[in-house]
Amino acid sequence: MADHQVLAGAHVVLPTGIVENGRVIVTGDRITGSAPEGAPVVDLTGHWLVPGFVDMHNHGGGGASFTSGTVDEVLKGVHTHRLHGTTTVVASFVTGEADFLTQRAGLLSELAEQGEIAGLHFEGPFISPCRKGAHDESLLRDPDPAEVRKLVDAARGQAKMVTLATELPGGLDSVRLLAEHGVIAAIGHTDATYEQTVQAIDAGATVATHLFNAMPGLGHRAPGPIAALLEDERVTVELINDGTHLHPAALEFAFHHAGSERVAFITDAMDAAGFGDGRYMLGTLEVEVKDSVARLVEGDSIAGSTLTLDRAFKRAATIDRLPVTAIVEAIAANPARLLGVYDRVGSLEPGKDADIAVLDAEFNLTGVMRKGEWIVDPTAV
């Protein structure tokens, strides 16, 4: 019986809808369809049971950087986010020297092979100096397909996404190369026009990196990339729902035009997530975190976030008033599909990994299970 658990009495969010007074059966590290008589029951009456969160854009946490930290530090950052319900995380890099990024890709690909992270995301260096945000402008370069291929190869099959300013020389060819290799081409940190963005989508780009941020605003004569990204059903848009990166009306606008099936909540978290205010390094640039908002010391640009996905979930439910089913799509199912891991995670279905988040009636996180093991025990006093 030790390998069986019945999580009972909760509002269970399934792909088909919400089951009241439902139950999820865990056998070993998987969700199963049945349990033997007498299996232990965990009473979760009044709580919500949702899939473990999937974060496809995350630079670190717990004081640790995925771009520059040691293996132990990276694992510390991963664990920090697990404590906040994110059971699947992609490690994102910021802009760096080519040789450094190649070395980091090789190092972190081992963690992906071990199942500690779900792959790698290169945010930079192939982005626009006009929309660089918290990236070192001296290290930016055009997206030469040969350089892009070198980074992808260094990741040994673990590269999941590359963010590009696709209007730059080599941008469209790089998008095509990424699509051919099964790597997500994401449009971001871009100064592209509407027409250039349409071209990039037609070439194979399928994700908008933190929509609205680090790109031209929506204009009535020059609609820019936002309109093109929202209107095309082939594109999933990332949103940082921390109350700093997006006004609630912008988030509502994105959901209205893209629909919940084309939104992915991300953190874009940096080292301070789950750690606290202070000074940090983001790549080569110094960042000051004050009142949980990260900004560059020089220039005052927003520098990632300190967001964790449990906070994004609660905000979406209590402030944005989104349906819980839509939030689960955006925070678990959609990113899992994009990453090609929906057969294992992203929903509470038999046969999948027992990756589960437990939320109370006010949408506070009270429990986290990863592969059948409680990381945060909802029954602990």
Image (cartoon, helix red, strand yellow):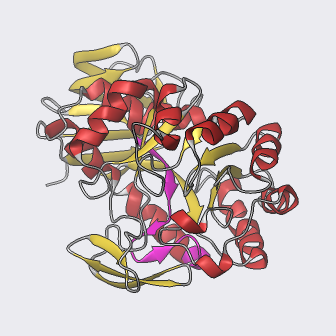
Q: 94 or 138: nearer the eye?
A: 138
Whether residue 349 is visible to the viewer of this picture, yes or no, is yes
Residue plotted at (51% across, 53% down): 57
Q: On screen, 268 above or below 27?
A: below
Q: Residue furthest top?
A: 16
- Pinpoint residue 55: horizontal percent, then vertical percent: 47, 48
Q: 379 or 209: nearer the eye?
A: 209
Q: Residue furthest front?
A: 221
Q: On screen, 17 above or below 39?
A: above
Q: Is residue 375 left or right of residue 73?
A: left
Is 56 part of what is drawn in magenta? Answer: yes
Q: On screen, 139 above or below 344?
A: below
**Picture quarter with the C terminus:** bottom left
- Pinpoint residue 225: horizontal percent, then vertical percent: 52, 42
**Picture quarter with the N terminus:** top left
State which quadrant residue 303 falls in: bottom left
- Pinpoint residue 345: horizontal percent, then vertical percent: 52, 34
- Report the magenta residues as a range: 52-72
Q: Is residue 173 left or right of residue 138?
A: right
Residue plotted at (36% across, 64% down): 305
